[in-house]
Image (spheres, rainbow, N blue to C red):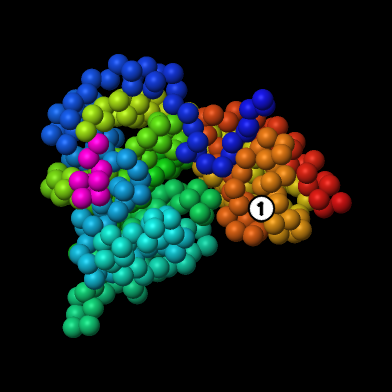
Amino acid sequence: MMKAIDLRSDTVTRPTPAMRQAMFEAEVGDDVYREDPTVNRLEELAARLAGKEAAIFVPTGTMGNQIALCTHARPGQELIVEGRSHVMLYEMGGPSVNAGLLTRTIATRDGILRWQQIQPLVRPPGDHYRGTGLIVVENTHNMAGGRVYPPEILAEIYREAHAAGIPVHMDGARIFNAAAYLGRPVDELAASADSVMYCLSKGLGAPVGSLLAGTRPFIEQARLARKGFGGGMRQAGVLAAAGIVALEQSPAGLPNDHANARYLADCISRMPGVAIDPAEVETNILVFDISRTGLHTREFSGRLREKGVLANGLDAARMRMVTHFDVSRKDCEQAVGVMEEMLRKAVA
């Protein structure tokens, strides 16, 4: 059977042989008792890479974000977030369901919040409202096509938010991609964030897990919230071992994923009926408009699947593709050939 070229997400990566070996050999204990040495080592490494005092291992990025919301803010307070952010669209209404927060969204073209957009929404507590409790930034921004926050924009948000007494949480699910794009270390990008969550199971290729990092008191409170979410994983060292390998080995391969994404964008931009600006493809995600092909994304995806290429539509007109270390340049070339043939027939 022909191997599918899976461009649906970087969550589809398979653990490397080094990860599987580390999982097999992992020393374990009960993490709820803080006795799993491999989890402890992962959390120490994760905190150091993020430039934070401490970190906690959680099953998913969504859980990490939700724990951050519950720990930073109180029910009835307001959350300021970009309108297409993961926290807003893809976490099962968690800000309201889990944290009791009122969400105030800002629409942007590129997924990047600026302080001049945030400032008018900031409210202190008053007689009629509980005030702004938290700001969330997403770096890289998934639905904006993997866009990266310019460091100077982040610095202004951190500075002004803290001057107003408001914490900032970074949904850094793909922060290692942002760091690779900018050529800067992760701890520099997250330095002034009050907390940061990043995933091991996306571009870094581990099978399971994310880390939430912040001050030691914050992580102590986050640990209680994790238990309330059902995130106490007991002998989790078998998972943490793969995460350690991912942090130590996988970041070096991210520039290759970015180069493959730009290659796809360049090729797709020349196809009939498709719209994408390759200059806006900064990391490993590309979003392109197929509305002028006359095809709905369901049909577009279905025809690709028939030829062994997997990709998802975001809505009726926009497709998303994501590169990762299980997709080679040869795979990308093959995917381009499949799309070119399909579109020649569709647009003819």
Q: Nearer the viewer, residue 155 or 169?
A: 169
Residue 28 visible to an observer of this rendering: yes
Residue drawn at point x = 60 percent, y = 28 percent: 328
Q: Is residue 227 magenta?
A: yes
Q: Is residue 50 magenta?
A: no
The reply, left or right, for residue 253 in relation to residue 98 is: right
Residue segment shown in magenta: 226-233
Residue 151 visible to an observer of this rendering: no
Q: Nearer the viewer, residue 342 or 139?
A: 342
Using a 10 Å C-alpha cutoff, classify the residue at mark 1 as few (fewer than 14 neighbours), some (14 to 19) or many (20 or more): some
Position in image of residue 232 (x %, y %): 22, 40
Residue drawn at point x = 49 percent, y = 32 percent: 13
Quarter of the image with the N terminus is: top right
The reply, left or right, for residue 301 in relation to residue 197 is: right
Which residue is the site of mark 1? 298
- Residue 169 in the image: above or below residue 231: below
Residue drawn at point x = 45 percent, y = 23 percent: 16
- Residue 249 in the image: above or below residue 314: above
Position in image of residue 323 (x %, y %): 55, 37
Q: Secondary structure at mark 1?
A: helix
Q: Magenta residues: mostly which secondary structure?
A: loop
